[in-house]
Structure formats: structure tokens, C-alpha cells
Image: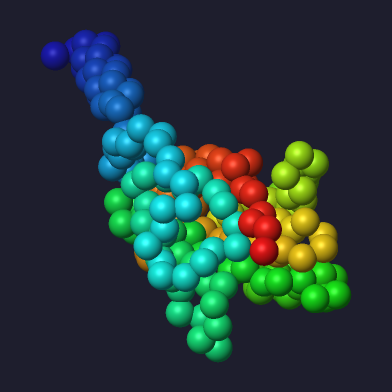
Amino acid sequence: MSLLKIRKKTNELLAGMILLLTLSGCRDVPVPKPRGYFRIDFPAKEYISSESNPVGHKIPFLTEYPLYGKLTSGDGSTGEQGWYNIELPDFNAKIYLTYKEVKNDLPSLIEQTYTMNVKNHISKADAINEEIISNDSSNVYGILYDLKGNTASAVQFYVTDSLKHYLRGSLYFNVEPNADSLATVIEFLRKDIVHMIETLKWKAD
């Protein structure tokens, strides 16, 4: 075989190898799939009045809470009345409610709520959004807090008539906080909290 033919054969082999390497490098590189979450079938939005509550003592306000929730009496650390829960077993969650009678201490109650329900979560929150609550027809005023990120509680609020009544609430899940997996549930239950606030009325003595 002549030197020219050998050189031509070598060039053909090299070209073939380059082509093979090029084609093998074009294969799809496996990319990890983003983490998925289970689909949740949410129940229809239906509400029941707290007037038909089973807690065993008078509640100083009226509101409508979700039918898939259960209103119970809380176990306040001091044993006093004014502690309530709306248990949401389908979502492994609970809305904690605490009622206080205003006795010339409204600024103190507001500061206490902010410290307990917001300041304690700031380190974990990516952001905290505030929505002003103002309903002149029912004398309900306050703030709704949305805490973004992996916080223990994603929704907090307080409402008052500025004279006698004060109510604070917070949504908690009985699972490790994960904003991504809980996002749709938080948004679903947030609407229930907004409905509770919108239908809230203070009871007269």
C-alpha cells in the first residue's frame, strides 16, 4: 500500500472517530426533575356560624368559620377563657384565636401580638406583608400579616373595635414548615381567615 493511500485511510479513520465523538456528545444529558408535590383536592367553601359553637361558654364575638373546621376551646396557659381553636384535620392545621377585653391597654395588646406573632418569625421569613383591615359597619379594625418563607406560621392577624374587644389569630401547621409544598394550602386557608374577619361581629354584653 502506498504512503498516499495509508495517509488517506488514516484521515478517514480520524474523521470517523471525530464524527462518532461529536455524535456521542450530543446525547441528552439527564437533568434531575424538580421536586413535585401531591395534588390536593380542596373541599367546597362552606361556612358555619360560631353561634352554634360547642365550646361550652359564651364567645364574645360572632364569625363564620369553614364547615371542614371544628371550633374548640383552647387551653390557655393561665386557664382563663378567651382561647379558641379552629381545628382543620384535613390539612393537619389549626387556627389559634385569642380574645382579650380591652382595658385601656390597646397599645400593649398590639405590641404583644406583634412580638409573639411576627417578631418571633422574622428570622425565618423572607418577607412580611401587611394588609390593613377596616370595616366601619362592624367596628372591626386591624392588620392581616402574610409571612413568606419557611415560617412556623404563615398568616397572622389582629382585629379590634379600639374600645373593648381585641382578637388575634394565627395559622399553624403540625408539620415542618415548607413554603413550597404548603403554598396552595396556605392560600386556601388564608381565604377562610379573610372570610372570618369579614363576617366578624362583636357581641354586646
Name the residue at the left extreme.
1
Residue 173 visible to the viewer? no
In this rendering, is residue 79 above or below 160? below
Quarter containing the C terminus: bottom right
Residue 8, quarter of picture = top left
From the top left corner, tell me how far across and down residue 153 is, in percent. Answer: 54, 62
Name the residue at the front extreme.
205
Name the residue at the bottom extreme.
78
Instruction: Report whether 134 appears left or right of 147.
Output: right
From the top left corner, tell me how far across and down residue 137 is, in percent. Answer: 76, 39
In this rendering, is residue 198 above or below 22? below
Instruction: Report whether 192 appears left or right of 53.
Output: right
Instruction: Report whether 101 appears left or right of 66.
Output: right
From the top left corner, tell me how far across and down residue 119 is, in percent. Answer: 71, 70
Instruction: Report whether 139 appears left or right of 197.
Output: right
Give the number of callouts.
Answer: 0
From the top left corner, tell me how far across and down residue 33 is, in percent. Answer: 33, 39
Residue 34, quarter of picture = top left
Residue at the image point whose x is 60% and y is 63% from the top: 60
Quarter containing the N terminus: top left
Residue 20 visible to the viewer? yes
Viewer-side residue, 7 vs 1: 7
Colour approach in the figure? rainbow
Residue at the image point whose x is 32% and y is 43% from the top: 37
Viewer-side residue, 85 vs 90: 85
Residue at the image point whose x is 45% and y is 79% from the top: 75
